[in-house]
Image (cartoon, grey):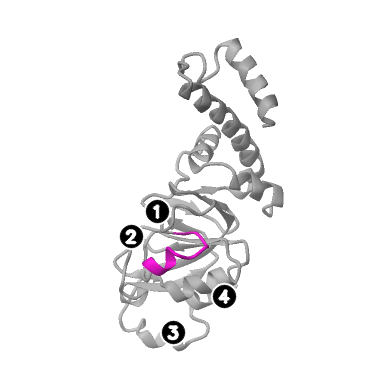
Amino acid sequence: MPLTTETRQNLMKVSVATLCTALFKRGLRNQFIQDVHPLNNTLPNMVGEAFTLRYIPAREDINPISVFLDRKHPQRVAVEQCPPGGVLVIDSRKDPRAASAGGILVARLMARGVAGVVTDGGFRDSPEIAKYTMPAYHNRPSAPTNLTLHQALDINVPIGCGDVAVFPGDVVVGDAEGVIVIPAHLADEVALEAVEMTAFEDFVTEKVHEGRSILGLYPPTDEQSRTDFAAWRQLNQR
């Protein structure tokens, strides 16, 4: 099911933490990509459908720098084919010792209207990428070219990224804390629930800052808490 404009907008307004809880309610415990961090944590949420690239360990006799002369090189093709509004998700085998990509390729993704890029490896030129307006997530900076350790093999196939299974078309959401993968068929309902959860959590946070106890409030086991939340929603048009 394609990502709708409404669902994209809803996911722009919620946190990855809230989405983790919504997925946990549905029995999905391992959707948060491990050891992946934003290069710029001040950007709006990254939201888009996954377009994947898979690396395997490089073999020196077939992975020299001259492979980049081939216009069909999978890394280059992935950069040119990841659709506008999509998220390029790279399986770098959780190995940041060699870069998954660098500033030029990430700039090309940004120029093409891609919503973001994620790798469980590293990016070279990371100080420059951190200045881009497109979200980028990686494990840590890495200067060596990917060719020294990684060989690009497959495009838009199921991959593992940071110990999470990512299928093409899954909905990928990133915020200042990290990145979560939502199975495509659950995206609409999870987004709607997350918006509701966010409204309630904002209400609770406001009341806690006012000095109210969490007992009976979070979760709202007291009827008064539910009544107060309904009034708060009406007042704040939430």
Judge whether 27 appears above or below 72 on screen. Answer: above
Residue shown at 57% from the left, 61% from the top:
115
Q: Nearer the viewer, residue 133 or 217?
A: 133
Q: Is residue 56 visible?
A: no
> Upstream in the sequence, badge 3 or badge 1?
1
Q: Nearer the viewer, residue 151 or 13?
A: 13
> Upstream in the sequence, badge 4 or badge 1?
1
> Upstream in the sequence, badge 4 or badge 2?
4
In the rendered image, residue 165, in percent from the top left (x then y), is placed at 48, 52
In the rendered image, residue 144, in percent from the top left (x then y), is placed at 30, 74
Q: Circle 1 is placed at which residue position?
A: 37
Q: Circle 2 is placed at which residue position?
A: 140
The magenta-colored residue range is 127-136
Labelled disc at residue 195: none
Check disc 3 and report its element: helix, strand or loop.
Answer: helix
Secondary structure mostly taken by the magenta-highlighted segment of the chain: loop
- Looking at the image, residue 144 sits to the left or right of residue 66; the answer is left
Q: Circle 3 is placed at which residue position?
A: 68
Task: Give the CA distance from mark 4 to mark 1.
Answer: 24 Å
Amino acid type at circle 1 is His
The answer to whether the residues at label 2 and label 1 have Cβ atoms under 8 Å apart is yes
Residue shown at 62% from the left, 37% from the top:
195
Disc 3 packing (10 Å; few <14; some 14–19; many ≥20): some
Judge whether 130 appears above or below 147 on screen. Answer: above
Q: Nearer the viewer, residue 225 or 49?
A: 225
In the rendered image, residue 114, in percent from the top left (x then y), is placed at 58, 65
Amino acid type at circle 4 is Glu
Amino acid type at circle 2 is Arg
Disc 1 packing (10 Å; few <14; some 14–19; many ≥20): many
Labelled disc at residue 80: 4
Q: Nearer the viewer, mark 4 or mark 1?
A: 1
Check disc 1 and report its element: helix, strand or loop.
Answer: strand
